[in-house]
Amino acid sequence: QVLALFPRALDTGSEHGTVTVRKGGVSCEVTTLRAEGELLDVGARAHSIDFGMCLKHDLLRRDLTINALAVHVASRALFDPLEGQQDIFSGTLRAVGSAEDRLGEDALRAMRAY
């Protein structure tokens, strides 16, 4: 749907619900709400991604609080249930929930934090 609305958008991962919208020299990743699918191996990414319906549940599955932010584009309202914006300003990297659990779910998360 997003690709249809923004013809210049880049398909950066539509199979995972992510596209990059470009407008006026600015690029912004747009991702549909998701829920984790079945894990095949401990420490690996989910085998499947289920598209979700609840913004808060989507943000709670993220790795870091700074990645658990959402903006309502029309109203410019920030949805920040885990205080990720405060972590950005203070230069803090904080896991959503247990860091051990988050890193155990997907071993690449540690590398993506850098």
Image (cartoon, rainbow, N blue to C red):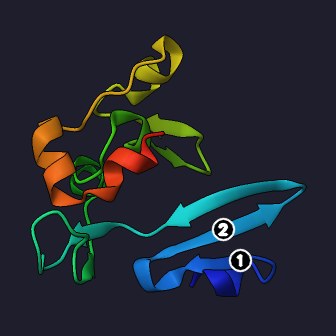
Q: Position of residue 26 (x, y in %)?
A: 81, 53
User: What's the residue type where badge 2 is placed?
Assistant: Thr
Quarter-of-image position of residue 61: bottom left
- What residue is shown at x 48% (from left), y 17% (from top)? 91
Q: In the rendered structure, find residue 72 and report the number of the disc placed on it.
A: none
Q: Earlier in the sequence, mark 2 or mark 1?
A: 1
Q: Residues within 10 Å of mark 2 (few under 14, many from 20)?
A: many
Residue 76 occupies quadrant: top right
Q: Vertically, is 65 above or below 13?
A: above
Q: Nearer the viewer, residue 2 or 109?
A: 109
Residue drawn at the location 35% of the way across and 66% of the way down: 33
Q: Say which amino acid is labelled 1.
A: Leu
User: Callout 1: 10 Å neighbours few (<14), some, many (20+)?
Assistant: some
Q: Secondary structure at mark 1?
A: strand
Write the residue at 44% across / 49% down.
112
- Tell me if label 2 and label 1 are in contact, CB under 8 Å: yes
Q: Relative to 43, is 69 above or below?
A: above
The residue under label 1 is 10
x, y (%) of residue 62? 30, 50
Q: Secondary structure at mark 2?
A: strand
Q: Position of residue 63 (x, y in %)?
A: 30, 46
Task: Give the camera-side residue of 80 and 91.
Answer: 91
Q: Quadrant of the N terminus?
A: bottom right
Tally of marks: 2
Q: Which of the two residues, 84 or 42, is positioned nearer the viewer here? A: 42
- Position of 86 compared to 110: left or right? right
Question: For mark 2, what is the residue?
Answer: 20
Percent position (x, y) of residue 22?
Answer: 79, 64
